[in-house]
C-alpha cells in the first residue's frame, strides 16, 4: 500500500501531464510585472494607486524570494520605487475538484483567479513596526501557526499567509498574484526594505496533504523545506546569470565614452617614452620581463654592497628598527620636524635646521643625535613625546656611529635566489592568492594531470577565470575602502553595504579606472549595495572628508588622515587639501565645522611648541578643487571627464587619467604587494614614507596596466607567471626582502584561513542570516539584511554594544571570533592600507584548539566532508594521504604517515557502523513544530533572551556525530582532524 | 626590516630573557609613566579593577541618586523616584530601598551622581563613549578602559592575561589602536569558561592529551621556520593556559556553598568569578550584568521594563554588597577598584508605558574600594536628577579618576601610529576622592 506522500506525487505527475502549454501556445511561464506608482506623493496606503510598468520578466512557478537587481549608470545597483507593485500572472490549469490554495507574502498580497480576489494577506508591517521597532513584539503568537500537512513548510519569520479551498472546473484559469514591496510605514513615512520574503502561491490537490508551488507548466516544485531549499538554490544561480547580463547591458550603454577613454590612454602611451626593459643578467633565471628587472636590481645592488665595511652592529638588524620606532614619526618623508630627515644616510648627514648634520661618523660623542637622545633638558630631549630611549638602544646607536655609521641602500643578507618552488607548493600558493582557499582534491588531481611544461601557466589561466577571484579580493577592498555597514541603527561611522558593488565589480573584472569612477560618482543604491553606500559616514561631521582620506590613500598613495582636523605634522597635506578633495567628492563647498578643528591656543598651553599646526579656521568655506597638481595637470586631464562640469566626474577623471601616472602606479603596486608580500613602494597607502625599490619596474608595470585597459587580472597574470613569484620561500626570513630574491612565508589572511578550513574539512559553512531584523519590521534606515554568508568576507560585525543576549548571532560570533584574532575587522570605521599586520597572539591557537568553530570542524557529523571521505572504500594509507592533500596540499612525511595510520588502524576495517538497528527501539519522532525565532522585533522580551541563550548553547554543542561511523574509530579520526586543523603550517602561505 | 619584524624580534628577545614563556605583557610599575607629560594628578594604589557594566542605562533616580517619591502607576504618572528612600551608612546620603545591603556598606562606595555627556542617547554610541572616554572618530579606533589599563599595567603575573571580559565581545570593549595583544579574553557566562581555553563538552583530559600528541609532529615541522615558530610558541602557551593552572580559577565549585549563595544568581556568580580572578592576578575584569530574561529590557527600562526593575536592582545590590564585603574580608578591597558603568541614565519623568526614556545630561557611575576616600555619593543633581547642580563630572573626568586610582597618569600620551593620544581627553581626577 502506498503512503499518502507517494499518492500525492502520483497525483501531481498526473496534473503535470495535462499542463505544459498555455492557451496561446507560447511556452508557459509566470509573467512578472514590476510597476511603479505614477507621479504623486509617496503613498502610505497599503496599495499604491495608479502604477505603470517599469520592468518585466518571466519566471517558472509562483515562488519568489528575490528580484533581479535593478542597475543604473554603468551597471551599479539601484533602488526601485517605494513602494513597487509586483504582479505575477500565468494561465494555470488545475483538474476539476476542490483544491487548497496557500498565499504567502512579506508585504500585503492578493491572489486573483480569473479577476476575482480569493485570498488577501494584510499589510501587517506597519502594525508590527509599531511594537516591533521597540523590540516588544509579543512572542505568544508564535505558539499558534498554520500546519496543513505532515510535510507542510511552516511560514518563515515575517511572512503572512492566508489559505482556502476552492472549486476548479478543469478549465484553464488566469492566476494573478500581486504584492507590495518596499511599502511605506505610515507614521515615519520611511519605506520597509523592498523584500519579497517568501512570496508564493502553493496548492494542495483535493485528497492530498502534500503541497506544490503553483505552476503553469510541467515544472513541479514540492513546497516542502527541502523542495524550497533546492528551488531557491537553483533560482539564485539563475538570478546571478540574469544580473550579470543586466550589468553588461548597462555598461554597454556607455561603451562609446569608455572607448574614447581607452583611445586617450593609448594615445598617451604612444606619446610618452616606453620603459626600457633591461637585458637579462647572466646567471639569473627568467620566465618573463619582470625577472629581467629583478635580476638587474640584484646585480646592481650587489656591486654597491661589496665595498661597505662591516662592524659589530648591523644597520638593518640593529639600527634601523630604533630609527623607525623612535624617530621616523617626525623625521621621515617629505615633511619633517626641524627640517631633519633620518631616513637616509645622505639626509642624516645633511642634517636639520637647528643642529646641522645629525651624526658625525666615528664620533658618537659629538654627534647631535646622541646628544639629543641623552639630554636631560625637557626642551631638548628627543623623542619630543613619549618615553626616552632605553640605554640599550642608545648604546647601539653610539657603537654604530663609532664603527663608521655604515648605511647600505638595502637590507640584504643574501643575493642568492631560491629555486622555483615545487609544483604542489606552487598550486597551494597560487590558489590561495587567487581563489582565497586551498585547492580541493580534484583541483590537485587536475593540476597533476596537466603536462609538466605548461601546468603552471594553464593553472594560472584557469584560476584567473574562476569567480572565486572576487572572494579573494573582497576582504582587501572592504578594508581599503572602509566598508562598514551595521545590522541595526547606524552609529559608528557606518556606511551602506557597498560590498555588493565591489563584489560585482570583481566578478565582472571591471577595469580599475571604471571601478574608481563609479566609486567617486557614488551613484545607485545607498542602503542596498550600490556605490552610493560609500558616501555615507553616520555620526561624522564631515563625511566627505572621511571619504577623501580613503580615496587619496587608496588610489593616490597620499595619506591624509592627519589633515582631517589640522595640517598634517609629518605629511605634506594641509587641511585645506583634504577639504578641497572632500568638496569635490561632495560636489559642493564645505564649511569647516568647529568640531573638525583643533584649538591651537589650548595646545600651546603646555611648554613646548605643539607638534601640529592648524591653518584653516573653523567656518571657512572650501570650494571643490583638485589638490594634487603634482600628479596630474588639471587642464590636460579634466576634459577626459564624461561630464566635466560635475565635480565628482571631474575628480574621477583626474584620478584615473593616464596622465596621472601616480594612479596606475599605486594600483600596480597594490596588486604587486598582494602577490609578492612586499610593495615596490613598501607603504602601499602612504608613498611619502618610502621610496620605490624598483622605480623602472614600477613604471613598467603601471604602463602595462594602462595598456591592458586597467585590467587587474592582466597584470596579475604577468606577476604570477614570473620566476620571482614562483620561487621557493626562504623559511628563515620573517619578511620578504626588497630585492625579491626569495619570498618569506606570508601570514594567511583571516578569511583565507577560515574559508580554507571549511573547504578542506568539507563541513558546510552554516551560520545565521547576517540580519537581526529577519521578520522585516524595521524601516530601511535602521536595519540591513546582508543575506546568507557562504564566505567569511560576507559576515559583518555582530558587535553587541547593547549587551543584550537576544541581539547575539551565536553561530556568526563563533566564526567571527576566529576571524578577528587573525586580523579581520567586523567593524571598519576607519580606512586601512590594505596590509594587515597581525602578530601571533595567544588567542589564535586558543580559539582554534577549543573554540566553537573548531567543534564544528572536528565533529564528524552526517554532513561533514571527512565523514564522507572516511566512508569511502579505500586503504588506510590512501585515507591519510588524502587528508594531508586536502589540508596541506602535500603528502604526509613518513613519520606523519606512521603516526596517523598507527592510530587509525585498529578497527579501520570495521569503521562503518552496522546499519543501525532501523527504527526498532528508536524514540518516536517528536511532532514537528515551527521553530521559535528571535529578531529585533521581540528582543526586549525575556523569552527572546532565553531562546537566544538556548541557540547559543546549541551552536556551542555543534551538530551531533554521525552514527554511520563506529564511535571509537570516529573519535580517533576526529582527534586527527583536530591536530591537522591546529597545525602551525596553516598560518602561513609558503 | 620593517616595524613588524622588529616588534616580532623584540618580543622574541623579551621571551628569551626570561625562562618562563610569556603570553602577556609583564607587569609594569605605575611609576614608569612618561616623564615628558608630568602633571600633578593624584595617584592611587589600586592594583586591580572590576568594571561592572549595566547595559541599557541604569536609572539613577531609582537607585543611587533618589529624589522625591514619584509614581509610575498613577494616572497621570508622577515624576520622581519609583521606590522608597533609605539611609546609608554615610550620614546624609540616601539610596533607594532595593539597595539596602549596599547602603550599609556606603562608606566604601561613592556614587558619582553628576556624570554627564552630550553624546546623545543612542545605546551603542554612548556605550562606546563610556568605555573609551572619547567620541567616535573617523580616523581611529580608541581603546577601551580595560585595554588601556592592560596596556599600562600589564598582568600582575606573566602567567595570566591582564584583561578578562565576562560578557559579549564588542568594539567598545576592544583594544582599538593598541592592537589585539591588549584585547580581552572573554566568556559569555560562568558555565562556558573563557572562549578558547575551556575544552569543548565531551573532550576529557585524556583526549586533550592524545590530541596534543598528534599535534606534536606537525609542530615539529614548524621548528626551523622564522615565522612559524612564533605561532608554535603562542600555541604552546595557549595549550598551557587551557590546562589546569589557569583554568582552575574558573572553577566556582571550589568555593563553599555559603559563599556562592551569598553572591546569588548568575550575575553574582560572575562577581565571584571576578574576585577569584583578582586573587589570581588578573588586572582588569569587565563583568556584564545582562541577564535580560529577568525583565526583557535589562536596564533599558522603557515601558513595562520598569515593572520588574526592582528585581534587577536587588540582584545588583546583593552581588555588589557580597563582592565589597568579600573583598574586604580578604583584604583585597583597598587594592581593588570596583567601577560600575552604564551608558547613560534615565529621566525622572515616566513614559506613557510607565517606564523611563534615556537621559545623558546627568547619571550615576559608581566607584567602590580601590583605596579611595569614599563618601557614599559625590556631586549634586537637581530636583529630578536631570542636571548637575554641583561638581559636574565629565566622562573623561570619571575615566581620569579610575586611571589615577590605579596609579596611571591620565594625561600620559599613548602612541597611535605616530600620533600622540593622551590616555584621557583632558580628564581631571575627582580630587576629593584622593589623599
Image (cartoon, rainbow, N blue to C red):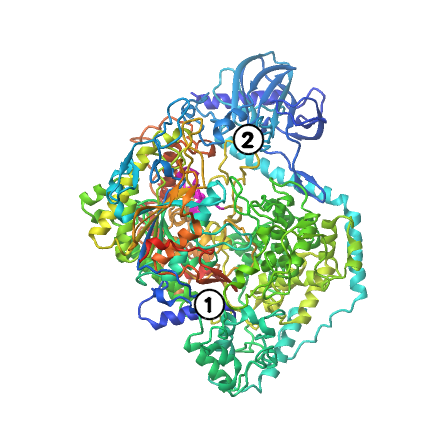
Left or right: residue A615 versus residue A222 is: right
Q: Name the residue under label 2.
A: A197
SS category of the residue bearing label 2? loop
- Residue B209, quarter of the rendered image: bottom left
Residue A765 shows in the view: no
Of badges 2 and 1, the one in the foreground is 1
State left or right for residue A619 relative to residue B394: right
Q: Nearer the viewer, residue A169 or B47?
A: B47
Residue A141: name its quadrant: top left
Please provide percent x and percent y for residue B73: 37, 24
Element at label 1: loop
Binning the other alpha carbons within 10 Å of mark 2 as few (below 14), some (14 to 19) or many (20 upward) gives many
Q: Which residues fall within the magenta stretch? A: A797-817
The percent position of residue A73, horizontal first and vertical second, equals 72, 43
Tell me which residue sits at (58%, 20%) in the image: A15
State the CA–CA distance, disc 2 to disc 1: 56 Å
Disc 1 sits on a residue from what chain? A
Q: Is the C-beta separation of discs 2 and 1 under 8 Å?
A: no
Depth order, front residue of A213/A6: A213
Q: Mark 1 points at which residue?
A: A386
- A305 vs A977: above or below: below
Q: Is residue A475 above or below residue A422?
A: above
- Against A576, residue A90 (above or below) is above
Closer to the chain start, of discs 2 and 1, is 2
Amino acid at each position: 500500500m502506498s503512503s499518502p506522500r507517494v499518492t500525492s506525487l502520483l497525483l501531481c505527475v498526473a496534473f503535470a501531464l495535462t499542463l505544459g502549454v498555455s492557451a496561446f501556445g507560447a511556452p508557459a511561464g509566470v509573467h512578472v510585472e514590476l510597476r511603479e506608482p505614477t507621479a504623486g506623493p509617496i503613498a502610505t496606503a497599503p496599495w499604491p494607486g495608479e502604477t505603470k510598468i517599469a520592468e518585466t520578466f518571466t519566471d517558472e512557478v509562483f515562488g519568489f524570494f528575490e528580484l533581479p537587481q535593478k542597475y543604473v549608470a554603468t551597471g551599479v545597483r539601484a533602488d526601485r520605487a517605494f513602494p513597487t507593485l509586483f504582479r505575477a500572472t500565468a494561465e494555470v490549469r488545475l483538474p476539476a475538484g476542490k483544491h487548497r490554495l496557500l498565499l504567502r507574502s512579506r508585504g500585503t498580497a492578493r491572489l486573483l483567479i480569473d479577476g476575482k480576489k480569493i485570498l488577501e494577506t494584510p499589510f501587517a508591517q506597519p502594525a508590527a513596526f509599531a511594537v516591533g521597532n521597540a523590540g516588544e513584539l509579543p512572542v505568544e503568537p508564535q505558539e499558534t501557526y498554520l500546519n496543513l500537512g505532515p510535510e507542510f513548510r511552516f511560514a518563515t519569520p515575517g511572512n503572512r499567509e492566508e489559505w482556502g479551498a476552492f472549486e476548479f472546473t478543469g478549465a484553464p484559469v488566469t492566476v494573478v498574484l500581486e504584492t507590495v514591496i518596499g511599502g511605506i510605514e505610515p507614521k515615519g513615512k520611511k519605506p520597509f526594505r523592498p523584500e519579497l520574503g517568501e512570496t508564493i502561491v502553493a496548492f494542495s490537490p483535493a485528497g492530498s496533504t502534500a503541497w506544490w508551488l503553483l505552476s503553469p507548466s510541467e515544472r513541479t516544485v514540492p513546497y516542502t523545506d527541502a523542495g524550497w531549499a533546492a528551488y531557491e538554490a537553483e533560482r539564485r544561480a539563475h538570478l546571478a546569470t540574469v544580473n550579470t547580463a543586466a550589468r553588461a547591458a548597462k555598461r554597454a550603454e556607455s561603451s562609446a565614452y569608455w572607448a574614447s577613454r581607452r583611445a586617450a590612454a593609448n594615445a598617451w602611451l604612444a606619446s610618452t617614452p616606453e620603459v626600457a626593459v633591461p637585458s637579462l643578467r647572466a646567471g639569473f633565471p627568467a620566465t618573463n620581463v619582470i625577472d629581467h628587472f629583478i635580476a638587474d636590481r640584484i646585480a646592481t645592488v650587489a656591486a654597491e654592497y661589496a665595498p661597505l665595511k662591516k662592524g659589530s652592529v648591523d644597520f638593518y638588524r640593529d639600527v634601523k628598527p630604533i630609527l623607525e620606532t623612535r624617530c621616523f614619526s617626525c623625521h621621515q618623508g617629505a615633511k619633517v620636524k626641524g627640517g631633519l630627515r633620518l631616513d637616509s644616510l645622505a639626509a642624516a648627514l645633511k642634517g636639520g635646521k637647528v643642529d646641522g648634520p645629525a651624526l658625525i661618523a666615528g664620533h658618537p660623542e659629538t654627534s647631535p643625535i646622541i646628544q639629543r637622545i641623552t639630554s636631560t633638558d625637557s626642551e631638548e630631549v628627543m623623542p619630543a613625546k613619549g618615553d626616552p630611549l632605553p640605554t640599550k638602544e642608545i648604546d647601539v646607536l653610539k657603537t654604530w656611529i663609532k664603527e663608521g655609521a655604515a648605511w647600505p641602500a638595502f637590507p640584504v643578507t643574501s643575493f642568492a635566489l631560491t629555486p622555483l618552488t615545487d609544483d604542489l607548493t606552487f598550486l597551494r600558493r597560487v590558489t590561495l592568492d587567487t581563489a582565497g582557499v586551498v585547492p580541493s582534491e580534484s583541483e590537485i588531481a587536475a593540476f597533476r594531470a596537466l603536462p609538466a611544461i605548461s601546468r603552471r601557466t594553464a593553472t594560472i589561466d584557469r584560476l584567473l577565470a574562476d569567480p572565486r577571484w572576487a572572494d579573494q579580493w573582497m576582504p582587501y577592498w572592504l578594508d581599503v575602502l572602509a566598508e562598514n555597514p551595521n545590522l541595526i541603527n547606524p552609529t559608528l561611522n557606518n556606511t551602506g553595504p557597498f560590498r555588493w558593488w565591489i563584489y560585482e565589480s570583481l566578478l565582472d573584472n571591471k577595469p580599475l579606472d571604471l571601478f574608481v569612477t563609479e566609486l567617486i560618482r557614488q551613484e545607485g543604491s545607498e542602503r542596498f549595495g550600490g556605490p552610493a553606500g560609500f558616501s555615507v559616514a553616520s555620526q561624522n561631521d564631515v563625511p566627505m572628508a572621511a571619504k577623501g582620506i580613503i580615496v587619496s590613500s587608496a588610489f593616490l598613495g597620499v595619506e591624509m588622515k592627519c589633515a582631517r582636523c589640522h595640517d598634517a605634522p609629518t605629511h605634506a597635506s594641509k587641511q585645506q587639501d583634504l577639504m578641497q578633495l572632500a568638496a569635490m567628492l561632495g560636489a559642493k563647498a564645505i564649511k569647516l565645522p568647529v568640531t573638525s578643528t583643533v584649538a591651537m591656543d589650548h595646545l600651546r598651553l603646555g611648554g613646548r611648541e605643539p607638534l601640529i599646526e592648524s591653518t584653516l579656521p573653523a567656518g571657512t568655506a572650501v570650494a571643490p578643487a583638485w589638490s594634487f597638481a603634482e600628479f596630474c595637470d588639471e587642464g590636460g586631464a579634466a576634459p577626459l571627464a564624461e561630464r566635466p562640469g560635475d565635480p565628482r566626474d571631474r575628480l574621477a577623471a583626474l584620478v584615473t587619467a593616464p596622465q596621472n601616472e601616480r594612479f596606475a602606479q599605486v594600483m600596480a603596486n597594490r596588486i604587486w604587494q598582494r602577490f609578492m608580500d612586499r610593495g615596490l613602494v613598501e607603504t602601499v597607502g602612504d608613498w611619502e614614507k618610502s621610496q620605490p625599490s624598483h622605480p623602472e619596474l614600477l613604471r613598467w608595470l603601471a604602463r602595462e596596466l594602462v595598456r591592458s585597459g586597467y585590467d587587474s587580472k592582466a597584470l596579475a597574470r604577468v606577476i604570477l607567471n614570473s620566476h620571482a613569484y614562483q620561487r621557493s620561500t626562504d623559511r628563515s626570513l620573517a619578511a620578504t626582502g626588497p630585492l625579491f630574491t626569495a619570498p618569506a612565508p606570508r601570514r594567511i589572511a583571516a578569511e583565507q584561513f577560515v574559508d580554507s578550513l571549511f573547504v578542506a574539512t568539507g563541513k558546510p559553512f552554516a551560520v545565521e542570516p547576517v540580519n537581526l531584523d529577519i521578520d522585516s519590521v524595521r524601516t530601511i534606515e535602521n536595519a540591513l539584511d546582508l543575506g546568507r554568508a557562504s564566505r567569511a568576507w560576507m559576515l559583518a560585525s555582530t558587535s553587541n554594544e547593547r549587551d543584550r543576549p537576544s541581539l547575539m548571532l551565536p553561530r556568526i560570533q563563533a566564526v567571527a571570533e576566529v576571524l578577528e584574532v587573525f586580523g579581520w575587522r567586523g567593524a571598519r570605521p576607519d580606512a586601512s592600507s590594505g596590509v594587515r599586520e597581525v602578530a601571533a597572539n595567544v588567542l589564535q591557537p586558543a580559539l582554534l584548539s577549543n573554540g566553537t568553530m573548531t567543534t564544528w570542524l572536528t565533529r564528524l557529523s552526517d554532513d561533514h566532508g571527512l565523514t564522507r571521505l572516511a566512508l569511502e572504500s579505500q586503504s588506510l594509507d590512501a585515507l591519510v594521504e588524502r587528508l594531508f592533500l586536502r589540508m596541506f596540499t602535500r603528502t604526509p612525511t613518513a613519520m606523519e604517515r606512521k603516526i596517523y595510520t598507527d592510530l587509525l588502524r585498529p578497527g579501520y576495517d570495521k569503521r562503518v557502523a552496522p546499519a543501525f538497528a532501523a527504527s526498532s527501539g528508536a524514540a518516536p519522532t517528536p511532532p514537528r513544530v515551527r521553530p521559535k525565532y528571535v529578531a529585533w522585533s521581540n528582543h526586549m522580551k525575556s523569552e527572546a533572551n532565553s531562546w537566544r541563550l538556548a541557540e547559543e548553547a546549541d551552536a556551542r554543542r555543534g551538530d551531533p556525530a554521525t552514527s554511520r561511523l563506529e564511535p571509537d574509530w570516529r573519535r580517533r579520526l576526529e582527534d586527527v582532524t583536530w591536530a591537522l586543523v591546529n597545525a602551525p603550517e596553516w598560518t602561513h602561505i609558503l | 626590516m620593517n616595524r613588524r619584524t622588529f616588534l616580532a624580534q623584540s618580543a622574541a628577545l623579551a621571551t628569551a630573557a626570561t625562562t618562563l614563556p610569556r603570553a602577556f605583557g609583564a607587569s609594569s610599575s605605575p611609576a614608569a609613566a612618561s616623564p615628558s607629560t608630568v602633571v600633578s594628578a593624584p595617584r592611587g594604589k589600586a592594583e586591580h579593577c572590576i568594571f561592572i557594566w549595566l547595559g541599557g542605562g541604569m536609572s539613577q533616580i531609582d537607585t543611587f541618586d533618589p529624589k522625591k517619591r514619584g509614581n509610575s502607576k498613577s494616572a497621570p504618572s508622577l515624576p520622581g523616584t519609583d521606590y522608597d528612600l533609605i539611609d546609608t551608612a554615610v550620614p546624609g546620603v540616601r539610596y533607594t530601598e532595593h539597595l539596602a545591603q549596599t547602603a550599609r556598606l556606603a562608606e566604601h562606595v561613592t556614587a558619582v551622581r553628576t556624570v554627564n555627556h552630550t553624546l546623545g542617547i543612542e545605546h551603542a554610541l554612548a556605550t562606546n563613549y563610556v568605555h573609551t572616554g572619547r567620541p567616535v572618530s573617523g580616523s581611529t579606533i580608541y581603546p577601551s578602559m580595560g585595554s588601556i589599563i592592560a596596556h599600562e599595567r600589564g598582568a600582575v603575573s606573566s602567567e595570566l592575561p591582564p584583561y578578562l571580559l565576562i560578557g559579549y565581545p564588542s568594539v567598545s570593549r576592544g583594544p582599538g589602536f593598541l592592537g589585539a595583544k591588549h584585547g580581552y579574553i572573554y566568556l559569555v557566562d560562568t558555565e562556558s569558561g573563557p572562549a578558547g581555553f575551556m575544552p569543548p563538552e565531551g573532550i576529557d583530559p585524556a583526549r586533550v592529551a592524545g590530541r596534543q600528541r598528534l599535534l606534536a609532529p606537525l609542530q615539529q615541522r614548524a621548528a626551523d621556520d622564522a615565522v612559524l615558530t612564533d605561532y608554535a610558541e603562542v600555541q604552546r602557551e595557549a595549550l598551557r593556559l587551557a590546562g589546569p593552572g589557569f583554568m582552575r580559577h574558573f572553577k566556582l565549585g571550589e568555593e563553599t556553598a555559603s559563599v556562592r549563595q551569598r553572591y546569588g544568581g548568575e550575575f553574582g556568580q560572575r562577581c565571584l568569578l571576578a574576585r577569584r580572578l583578582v586573587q589570581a592576578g588578573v588586572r582588569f575584569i569587565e563583568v556584564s550584568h545582562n541577564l535580560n530574561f529577568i525583565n526583557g529590557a535589562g536596564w533599558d527600562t522603557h515601558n513595562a521594563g520598569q515593572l520588574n526593575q526592582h528585581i534587577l536592582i536587588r540582584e545588583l545590590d546583593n552581588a555588589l554588597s557580597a563582592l565589597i564585603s568579600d573583598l574586604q574580608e580578604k583584604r583585597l578591597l583597598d587594592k581593588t577598584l570596583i567601577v560600575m558603568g552604564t551608558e547613560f541614565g534615565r529621566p525622572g519623568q515616566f513614559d506613557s508605558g510607565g517606564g523611563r526614556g534615556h537621559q545623558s545630561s546627568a547619571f550615576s557611575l559608581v566607584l567602590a574600594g580601590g583605596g579611595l576616600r569614599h563618601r557614599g555619593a559625590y556631586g549634586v543633581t537637581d530636583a529630578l536628577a536631570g542636571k548637575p547642580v554641583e561638581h559636574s563630572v565629565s566622562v573623561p573626568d570619571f575615566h581620569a579618576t579610575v586611571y589615577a586610582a590605579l596609579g596611571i597618569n591620565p594625561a600620559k600620551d599613548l602612541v597611535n601610529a605616530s600620533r600622540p593620544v593622551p590616555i584621557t581627553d583632558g580628564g581631571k581626577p575627582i580630587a576629593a576622592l584622593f589623599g
